[in-house]
């Protein structure tokens, strides 16, 4: 009887934990969609990617904490951004990859979100 209770509690905690991670990652996907939309709008208006400082001003809670990364080239004609994830979510923009930045282990990268816009 004790083993069944232990297994039941363990499974419940596991499901609760995964539900929390899914909720957090779903919010991150929403933020990533906003960032990608910002890049596309900026590219349409200016014909190039924004500077890092512009992105940092637009999204002050994401980039200064070093969980999100943004890399434009010098001419700002190509750029990528990376954001942290825990679970693979099919609706997430970009491609999944193992992150090289500790403590983030798993990340999604969106390369050249404005491709074809300018």
Image (cartoon, grey):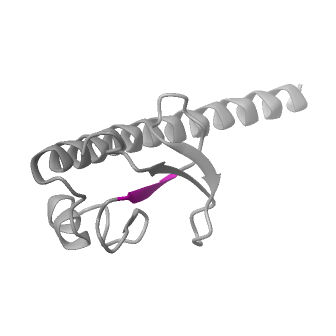
Q: Quadrant of the N terminus?
A: top right
Left or right: where does residue 37 sit relative to residue 26?
left
Q: On the picture, is 56 further left or further right than 11?
A: left
- Residue toward you, 75 or 108: 75
Q: Is residue 50 left or right of residue 12?
A: left
In the depicted structure, whether residue 22 falls above or below residue 57: above
- Left or right: 31, with 68 as reference point: left
Residue 2: x, y in percent? 87, 31
| Residue stretch in magenta | 78-84
- Rendering quarter of residue 117: top left
Q: Is residue 79 magenta?
A: yes
Of 22 and 99, the residue lying toward us: 99
Residue 8 vertical position relative to residue 41 in the rendered view, above or below: above
- Where residue 66 sits in the image (x, y, percent)? 40, 71
Provide residue 101's location: percent of width, then percent of height: 57, 71
In this view, the residue in front, 109 or 19, is 109
Q: Quadrant of residue 54?
A: bottom left
- The residue located at (15%, 66%) in the rendering is 57
Q: Is residue 88 magenta?
A: no
Position of residue 12 relative to residue 115, above or below, is above
- Residue situated in front as seen by the camera: 32 or 112: 112
Quadrant assignment, res 90: top right
Q: Position of residue 73 (x, y in %)?
A: 37, 69
Q: Is residue 60 above or below residue 8?
A: below
What secondary structure characterizes most of the magenta part?
A: strand
């Amino acid at each position: 009887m004790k083993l069944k209770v232990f297994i039941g509690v363990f499974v419940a905690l596991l499901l609760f934990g995964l539900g929390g991670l899914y909720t957090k990652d779903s919010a991150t996907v929403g933020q990533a969609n906003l960032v990608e939309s910002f890049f596309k709008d900026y590219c349409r208006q200016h014909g190039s990617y924004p500077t890092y400082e512009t992105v940092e001003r637009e999204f002050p809670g994401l980039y200064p904490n070093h969980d999100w990364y943004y890399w434009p080239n010098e001419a700002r004609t190509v750029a990528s951004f990376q954001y942290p994830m825990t679970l693979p979510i099919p609706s997430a923009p970009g491609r999944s990859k193992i992150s090289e930045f500790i403590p983030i282990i798993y990340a999604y990268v969106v390369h050249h979100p404005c491709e074809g816009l300018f």
